[in-house]
């Protein structure tokens, strides 16, 4: 009798666990929530989420000095000038604390250009910021790690090529912590790009098969 009850309890537990996993997968797929980690929820960024959190995203990105203010329309666009932002929605993520905006990290597949700065197809980290009240808790590092890990797995969806990541950031001394953050993940400075009011470092990270 005891054996039978134990057997039934075990079976019912397995069925409930199975149903729990299935229901969670369906809910996550519907909301595009990827996973919950350290109490924060990571979502693949979508145009709907930009509509909802666009102001928070722009405010966080506008902390970057000497860069034009960001707009929701700009976050939604599929091109930047002539450059096509290939597969942008597959390479961009949003971090929330319950319903509150915590951080954003956006990227796209950037086609090689006929210049010394972007000679290879790469997955380009285009926008990255953490809300002021969440800074200096390791979230920035965590977001870059998530972004690299996820993109290492999915790789290029549109462009061909050896997997390379690229990013650019202001070369000034006040930006030392951002430069160090990228370098800590193995990004190497490959060139510089001059604008009217600033100069940026350009970094590439090449990913080999066994990494
Ligand atoms: C860059 C940014 C995303 C970092 O986010 P964060 O959550 O504060 O980063 P972390 O807590 O993971 O800190 C990473 C490192 O930077 C250091 N750091 C973070 N902010 C710093 C600051 N204002 N001054 C000096 N060092 C700082 C941390 O001490 C940590 O160093 P460690 O690895 O030696 O411990 C955040 O400062 C930000 O949103 N800045 C404005 C937007 C921006 O500049 N984006 C980058 C565009 S290229």
Image (spheres, rainbow, N blue to C red):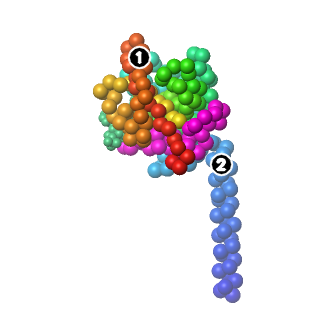
User: Residue at left 53%, top 44%?
Assistant: 208
Front residue of 179 and 113? 113
Looking at the rendered image, the quarter that the N terminus falls into is bottom right
- Where is 12 relative to 74, above or below? below
Residue 161's label in the rendered image is none
Q: In what element is the residue under mark 1?
A: strand
**Mark 2 CB within 8 Å of ligand 1:** no
Where does the image place residue 159, in percent across and percent down from the top left? 64, 31
In this picture, residue 104 sits left or right of residue 178: right
Q: Within 10 Å of the Cα at label 1, are there few (<14), some (14-19), or many (20+) other Cα atoms?
A: few
Front residue of 1 and 72? 72
Q: Which residues are magenta?
A: 137-163
User: Which residue is denoted by mark 2 in the rendering?
Assistant: 27
Where does the image place residue 51, in percent across and percent down from the top left? 58, 28
- Where is 191 relative to 154, above or below? above
**Mark 1 CB within 8 Å of ligand 1:** no
User: Residue at left 47%, top 33%?
Assistant: 204
Where does the image place residue 42, in percent across and percent down from the top left? 53, 43
Front residue of 67 and 22? 67
User: Residue at left 50%, top 38%?
Assistant: 206
Point out the residue furthest to the top here: 196
Distance CA(mark 1)–CA(mark 2): 46 Å
Residue 141 shown in magenta: yes
User: Which residue is denoted by mark 1 in the rendering?
Assistant: 194
């Amino acid at each position: 009798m005891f054996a039978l009850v134990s057997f039934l309890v075990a079976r019912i537990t397995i069925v409930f666990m199975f149903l729990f996993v299935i229901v969670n997968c369906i809910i996550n797929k519907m909301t595009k929530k990827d996973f919950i980690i350290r109490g924060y929820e990571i979502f693949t960024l979508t145009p709907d989420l930009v509509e909802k959190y666009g102001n928070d995203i722009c405010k966080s990105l506008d902390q970057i000095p000497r860069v034009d203010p960001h707009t929701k329309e700009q976050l939604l666009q599929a091109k930047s000038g002539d450059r096509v932002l290939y597969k942008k929605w597959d390479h961009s993520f949003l971090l929330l604390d319950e319903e509150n905006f915590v951080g954003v990290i956006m990227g796209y597949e950037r086609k090689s250009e006929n210049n010394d700065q972007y000679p290879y197809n790469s997955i380009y980290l285009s926008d990255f910021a953490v809300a002021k009240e969440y800074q200096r808790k390791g979230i920035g590092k965590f977001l870059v790690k998530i972004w690299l890990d996820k993109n290492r797995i999915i790789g290029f969806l549109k462009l061909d090529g050896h997997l390379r990541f690229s990013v650019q950031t202001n070369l000034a001394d006040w930006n030392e912590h951002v430069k160090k953050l990228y370098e800590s993940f193995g990004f190497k400075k490959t060139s510089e790009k001059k604008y009217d009011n600033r100069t940026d470092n350009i970094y590439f990270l090449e990913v080999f098969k066994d990494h």
